[in-house]
Image (spheres, rainbow, N blue to C red):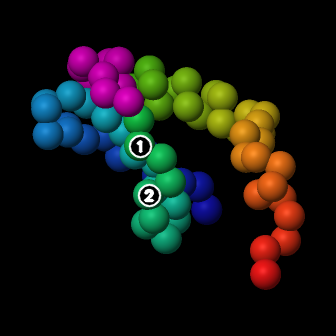
Amino acid sequence: MAGIFEVFLDGESFFRFRLKSPDGAVIAVSTPFEDKPAVVAGIAAARECAGMGLVTDLCPWQACVNRP
């Protein structure tokens, strides 16, 4: 099942979206947008980029070592 995008107004009256997993967990929250057309365009961009987006590991190499 696919995730769900929810559009909402934040505490400063900016539009944002959040992506929720099928079980309801919040996976991501967007930056603020000025209006609804802009937040809809942001969702479209997220859909386009996320599908095949590359993963960049920025963790220090020590984090890759097994921990006790």
Q: Quadrant of residue 5?
A: top left
Q: In this view, does 46 lie to the left or right of 29?
A: right
Q: Give the amino acid at mark 1.
A: Val
Dot 1: element: strand
Q: Distance between the residues labelled 2 and 1?
A: 8 Å
At horizontal 66% and vertical 36% (from top left) the residue drawn is 50
**Extent of the magenta region:** 31-39
Dot 2 corresponds to which residue? 26
At horizontal 31% and vertical 40% (from top left) the residue drawn is 7
Relative to 60, say whether 67 is above or below: below
Relative to 39, say whether 26 is above or below: below
Dot 1 corresponds to which residue? 29
Dot 2: element: strand
Q: In which quarter of the image is residue 8?
A: top left
Does the magenta portion include 46?
no
Name the quarter where the C terminus is drawn.
bottom right
**Image position, residue 65 (x, y; %):** 86, 64
**Image position, residue 40 (x, y; %):** 39, 26
The one nearer the camera, 26 or 45, is 26
Asked if marks 2 and 1 touch (Cβ < 8 Å), the reply is yes
